[in-house]
């Protein structure tokens, strides 16, 4: 019995063993098949994947294109950036290393705090920038003492440099680090993700950023499983950005900035035939290098709190009443409309009435009987009240628009303002009010709602001087088709100045009045005439009120400009061109709260025209022809 039972158990055990052995064999077969599939059939694919995991492709930032003036002088360049980085895993104490570094070069508290913060966030082998833009002496001092600075490594890169500092700040602008807003607003570009990569933030640097940026290079490196770079396998340098040639003349720009001095002012000098902006000044200014390297808190606060607004480009963004510089437009509108002739005369006794309101001339006793040319020469307000009333504001607005006022001129800069040339339709649409006769009187002398920029006034003067041609201003020398976001297909390789259809006889009458302003016996700016034979200039002064003079003040005594607080003084303006007999250059000048246009702005405009005639940027073409 027991033997039979034992035999049965033995058979069951043997059967189960066989089943288990078969299962194990089947499982091993599956595993062997899978290993064969992975190691033999798919070996090439996984070898490639392993190599890709080991080999990393890294972008190399290209060299940014240069910006030069019309004669090749660099106004934005690249220079070596001596910098210090720290690798945490190579030092026992980051703080001790920073202390030793501070004994050699000053390390600010802000830099120290930033480095300590980044060491906690980044892997130990990742370089952390400590200081940039070191001098050669500082760089050498650290290099000599590097054995005593564990974790410190020296590096040489490239950084943007502006050799003329404040002279070109509002034109060239500056570069800065890529912000989160930039990443959201700009077209996707892998370069924007590179640590330390900088893009144009203002001025020409921003407007032509894509062209200046260049094309990235690549570096193929071998790295281990932790991402540490073992060696560089190959490198392909990128393409540097395009160089840009400005229309600006460095020497003229230098002189203009020095001549404007400490005023809050702006000036534009333009070639009346080509539209080349030879100088564009807005003072006070700032050093763009501060923004490139990282501006300090105190310096930033100082720029923001300055009442003269150094960060604003007054030449294109400052909007001012043009005052009497607008009278040429009013005169042309009246002549073209046929409401007056060249011999139209008005008697000025110092004021005129419109209903119950009295409108005053700047000359209390009046000018007597004047024709158009003498009215421009002596800047008689009463005369222009009369002709403005005759022609109406809409005709004046139409003429102003033809001469570049009230609209953006699409210069190669962001931030340009359009100014304002009012009309009956504008007032009804914007203010919900009907146009009044008093509004027309104010427009007739360039006051009221009228606003212009210094650039617009320079273009207006250029179009007057060149015989009524629609010259357009430009800051960058023609390169054919531009590559900006706003005008990718615009062809500026050819100057196309169309005749605006203004009567040549009317222009001659207005230009004759401008000549008399400076050279006539009663001209408002006769003290500022150019005495060099053949260089004579024609111009027009303007004094724009920033506050209304009350009736009480007129009855007692109107305070002189220098007796009022600075912010309540009138703006001083002057527009001019030269030479009168062979016009080539036009200028506009505004001195904020400067007082009298003829006394303050006219001498500056004269000096700028004399300097541009002395330098004569046209010598470039003559030299090329020779």
Image (tube, rainbow, N blue to C red):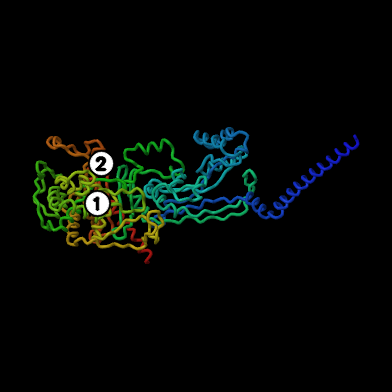
Q: Quadrant of the N terminus?
A: top right
In the picture provided, is 511 more to the left or to the right than 482? left
Front residue of 135/335: it is 335
Residue 235 coordinates in the image, percent (x, y): 58, 54
Quarter holding residue 595: top left
Q: Residue furthest front?
A: 1
- The label on residue 575 is 1
In the picture provided, is 235 more to the left or to the right than 388? right
Q: CA distance from mark 1 to mark 2?
A: 17 Å
| Residue 250 visible here | yes
- The label on residue 194 is none
Q: Residues within 10 Å of mark 2 (few under 14, many from 20)?
A: many
Q: Quadrant of the C terminus?
A: bottom left
Residue 207 coordinates in the image, percent (x, y): 40, 51
Residue linked to disc 2:
593
| Residue 162 visible here | no
């Amino acid at each position: 019995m027991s033997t039979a039972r034992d035999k049965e158990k033995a058979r069951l055990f043997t059967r189960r063993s066989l089943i288990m052995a078969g299962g194990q064999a089947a499982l091993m077969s599956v595993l062997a098949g899978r290993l064969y599939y992975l190691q033999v059939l798919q070996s090439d694919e996984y070898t490639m994947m392993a190599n890709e995991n080991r080999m990393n492709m890294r972008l190399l930032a290209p060299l940014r294109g240069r910006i030069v003036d019309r004669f090749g002088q660099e106004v934005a360049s690249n220079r070596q950036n001596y910098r210090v980085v720290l690798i945490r895993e190579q030092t026992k104490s980051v703080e001790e290393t920073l202390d030793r570094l501070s004994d050699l070069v000053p390390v600010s508290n802000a830099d120290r705090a930033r480095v300590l913060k980044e060491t906690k966030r980044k892997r130990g082998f990742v370089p952390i920038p400590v200081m940039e833009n070191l001098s050669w002496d500082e760089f050498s001092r650290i290099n000599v003492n590097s054995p005593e600075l564990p974790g410190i490594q020296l590096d040489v890169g490239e950084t943007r440099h502006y050799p003329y500092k404040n002279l070109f700040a509002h034109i060239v602008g500056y570069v800065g680090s890529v912000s989160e807003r930039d990443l959201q607003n700009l077209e996707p570009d892998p370069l924007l993700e590179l640590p330390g990569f900088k893009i144009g933030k203002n001025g020409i640097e921003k407007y032509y950023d894509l062209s200046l940026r260049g094309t990235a290079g690549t570096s193929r490196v071998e790295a281990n499983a932790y991402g540490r770079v073992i060696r560089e396998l190959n490198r392909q340098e990128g393409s540097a950005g395009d160089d840009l040639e400005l229309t600006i003349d460095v020497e003229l720009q230098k002189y203009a900035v020095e001549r404007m001095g400490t005023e809050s002012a702006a000036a534009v000098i333009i070639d009346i035939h080509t539209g080349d902006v030879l100088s564009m000044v807005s003072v006070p200014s700032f050093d763009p290098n501060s923004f490139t390297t990282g501006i300090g808190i105190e310096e930033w606060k100082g720029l923001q709190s300055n009442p003269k607004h150094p960060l604003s480009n007054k030449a294109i963004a400052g909007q001012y009443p043009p005052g009497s510089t607008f009278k040429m437009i009013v005169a042309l509108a009246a002549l073209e409309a046929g409401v007056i002739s060249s011999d139209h005369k008005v008697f000025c006794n110092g004021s005129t009435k419109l209903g119950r309101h009295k409108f005053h001339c700047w000359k209390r006793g009046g000018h007597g009987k004047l024709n158009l040319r003498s009215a421009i020469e002596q800047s008689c307000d009463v005369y222009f009240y009369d002709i403005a009333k005759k022609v109406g504001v809409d005709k004046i607005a139409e003429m102003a628009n033809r001469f570049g006022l009230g609209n953006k001129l699409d210069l190669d800069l962001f931030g340009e303002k359009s100014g304002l040339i009012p009309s009956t339709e504008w007032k009804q649409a914007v203010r919900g009010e009907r146009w009044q006769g008093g509004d027309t009187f104010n427009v007739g002398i360039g006051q009221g709602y009228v606003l212009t920029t210094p650039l617009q006034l320079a273009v207006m003067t250029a179009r007057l001087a060149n015989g009524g041609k629609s010259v357009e201003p430009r800051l960058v020398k023609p390169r054919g088709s531009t590559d900006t976001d706003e005008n990718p297909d615009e062809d500026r390789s050819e100057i196309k100045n169309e005749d605006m259809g203004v009567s040549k006889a009317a222009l001659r009458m207005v230009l004759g009045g401008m000549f008399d302003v400076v050279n006539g016996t009663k001209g408002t700016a006769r003290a500022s005439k150019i005495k060099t034979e053949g260089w004579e200039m024609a111009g027009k002064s303007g004094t724009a009120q920033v506050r209304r003079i009350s009736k009480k003040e007129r009855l007692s005594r109107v305070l002189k400009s220098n007796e009022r607080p600075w912010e309540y003084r009138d703006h001083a303006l002057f527009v001019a061109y030269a030479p009168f007999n062979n016009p080539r250059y036009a200028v506009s000048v505004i001195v904020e709260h400067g007082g009298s246009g003829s006394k303050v702005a006219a001498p500056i405009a004269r000096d700028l025209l004399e300097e541009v005639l002395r330098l004569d940027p046209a010598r470039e073409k003559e030299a090329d022809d020779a």
